[in-house]
Amino acid sequence: MAATEELIRVAVEAGTPLLLATLGEIYAERSGVLNLGVEGMMLMGAATGFMVTFVTHNPLLGVVAAAVVGVLLSLVHAFVSITLRANQVVSGLALTMIGLGLSSLIARKFVGLPLPVRIPTIPIPGLSQIPIIGPGFFNHDPLVYFSYACVAILWYVLYKTKMGAAIRAVGENPAAADAMGVNVFLVRYLCVALGGGLAGIAGAYLSLVYAPMWIENMTAGRGWIAIALVVFALWDPLRAMIGAYLFGGLEAAQFTLQARGIDPSLLGMLPYIATIIVLLIGVKETLRKRIGAPAALCKPYYREERTL
Amino acid sequence: MLKLKLIEKEKSPKIEIGKARLLVEMRNIVKKFYRVVANDGISLSIYPGQIHALLGENGAGKSTLMNILYGVYRPDEGEIYVSGRKVSIKSPKDAMRLGIGMVHQHPRLVEALSVAENISLSLTDVGVFASPRVIKPRIMELARKYGMKVNPDAKIWQLSYSERQRVELLRVLMQNAKVLILDEPTTMLTSSEKKELFSMLRKMASEGKAVIFITHKLEEALSVSDIITVLRKGRVAAQVAPEEVTVEELARLMLGYEMISTVKREPHRYDGVVLKVENLHVLGDAGVPMVKGVSFEVRQGEIFTICGVAGNGQRELVEAITGLRKVARGKVFFLGRDVTNTSPRLLADMGVAHIPEDRIHVGIVPDMSVAENLALKKYRSPEFSTRFTVMYDKIYEWARSLIKQYSIIAPSEKIPAKHLSGGNIQRLILAREFSGEPRLMVAVNPTYGLDVAATNFILSKLLEAKKRGVAVLMISEDLEQALKVSDKIAVMYEGQLKGIFPVEEADIREIELMMVGVK
């Protein structure tokens, strides 16, 4: 049974950065803004989180700084795509490229340095004693617990509150939402900023807990997987959890299987092959349910446009 | 201006004339879209306790003016005063804060959200972290008060047009608006529902609310309102009290010329069967059967109309016949050929034309130009394209001739189709669908929301087609109109046809009862 416990533990650990980034992107897309800059925001979060923690010896400060940097970067995207109404795809891609270059530039001196402090693992009394799932889910660092809380809160807000209804309304039919008195621009800005903050924290998790160190381009495509996971989860925070741990498990399995002589580059492809399969499944299920992708995704909103 | 008087009348004894009681005043409002001047210096005064009809043809500027009052559009010029204070209404939120609420002609609701969620979004007394479910009792109570049937948990996409309209009305009522703007609210209602609505509006006015009622229907303006403002081509043509004018005078004010009804039915002359539907079963969006064993035939040169209250399976039936929805069981024959579950493209090529219910989202591609929309079914033909390229010059030339022939009002054939008014969009669809010389025309509420001129135009085109031997299958909620133009009438209720009879034998009372399932 120890093997199962270990598998769950590793899957959760590898899945947490994916989960955080996916949750943020779900909110951004639910409000109608596609942000392809997740990878860039994660990289900046990872670099900033590492540097601040390295200098201050305070991991909490590092995580907060990573979140702030993520928010700032996402606001660039928000301004370009919401206020200036430019193409969201191009703006998001630009963000990824900026994040990649800028993080390498500012954190060059920190490459490969060991982190002076560790974020402690805190087993949750009681829960961590549950056989099989206990050690897998409830023997982690505080950031993992933070991600659990995010799933619960974001799910609740999205489906059970008026604010969630407003977010879905803005992503579905901004003109109607506007007519009902919802501030379309504010909602979109907030959702994109939330996405940026969570992507920043996801990056910090990589450089402070998962690695823990800073290497150039250390996200290695996780931001893109997160974007695919949004589709897999059908824009639902709960399903994002399943997807993130599944992919986390795949990633972790790379190391075990490699030990048994399976080609590492083949294994490296696995998450991306899975992404494509997941996209296909996601598309089909979307069709079946008739409501999947927010209808106004990628569409800037102009109030004065005569749409009848 | 013909007359400019405010008349006190027994219907609404509370009215006091004078600045002090003036609720809303709009002064010299000007609004332009591209080169189209929608409002050209309109002034309007709204008093509490009055039902104020805003009468005009499509494109007269009624909706634009009210969208300005509701903060959807910003005026290019002009001022708005509410309770004597000059205001700047930048968004619907501002309008709501000032007590102005609007029920749109095309209900502005979010399809993926439930009724309660949609309504909660516009209520400021529901906190952002509160559950939209808390307002369910309030919705039910209000619905009961006005005798409406509504399920607060239903998703909007599952509802018909008229049900959506009701939700929007409830939404505005729950905002405690002082000024209620209703944009063509009666278009999809049956005559009994209309009566209910009117008595509700009367009740609201007696509670001291100001009701602005946008319409192009002369009889409605005359029967329900205290004062009528007639708009024509973006200007105020007249302001009159209903008891001061006759229908004919009002029509002349609205149209600017004498109205001549060109719609006359002629008995049908051909009898080859064009469309035959046999024991058809179709599932709805929610996966439940919506069409349950429907059989009928439509012959050449015949207008066959299926009447019914929206949501009784008409949409699913039409979508199944036009290839847009899978047939679960049963058969569809077109000119003797089995076309069950055939693709829409093949059906179109065979001669099936379709005027869809949702003219903006299904009827046209809103962002494409008028010319491109006209050519949607024809661009592939050698007339307009070589093997690799589309010959735009020819399409533009052809489009200009169709625009003329169908009197489509558009500044250019190259502007996006979404900039046209509803009536002109429908003319565009009609022009496109008839350009393929169809054998069968499936028309769903073809005159929904259209003004007198456009309605007459569309109906006369359908009658012309019938004369040429086209089979017309019409879906209609407008029983009076159906009786005027159809050869045969069928009533659809809960997925079944409750009877098919020649129009000569149709009795309006009996059909209305069938439509609501009493007979």
Image (cartoon, rainbow, N blue to C red):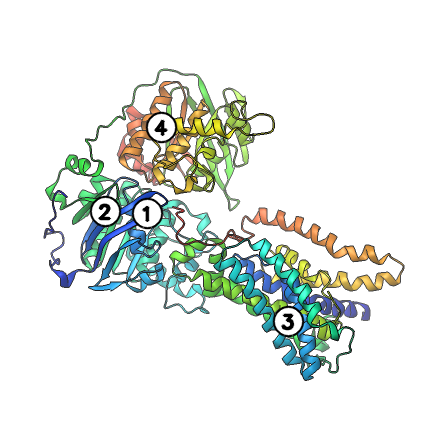
Q: Position of residue B362 (x, y in %)?
A: 46, 39
Image mark 4: chain: B
Give SS at disc 1. strand
Q: Who is closer to the viewer here, B194 or A275?
A: A275
Callout 1 amino acid: Lys
Give, as a three-letter code, the residue at label 3: Ile
Q: For the point 41% across and 38% down, which residue is it?
A: B357
Label 3 sits on residue: A201
Both marks 1 and 4 on one chain? yes
Viewer-nearest of discs 2 and 1: 1
Q: Give the camera-side residue of B337 and A193.
A: A193
Q: Would you say B397 lies left or right of B211 here? A: right
Q: Amino acid at mark 2?
A: Leu
Residue that carries the numbered disc 2 in the rendered image: B54
Query: What is the number of the mark on residue B404?
Result: 4
Q: CA distance from mark 4 to mark 3?
A: 62 Å
Mark 3 secondary-structure assignment: helix
- Give the chain letter at badge 3: A
Q: Quick one: quadrant of the N terminus of chain A?
A: bottom right
Residue A28 pos. (x, y %) = 55, 61
- The quarter of the picture where residue A226 lies is bottom right
Characterize the local packing of mark 2: few (<14), some (14-19) or many (20 or more) Cα atoms within 10 angstroms.
Answer: many
Real-space Cα separation, disc 2 to disc 1, in angstroms: 19 Å
Q: Please say if the residues under marks 4 and 3 sit with CB atoms less than 8 Å apart.
A: no
Mark nearest the camera among 1 and 4 is: 1
**Residue found at x 47% / y 42%:** B367
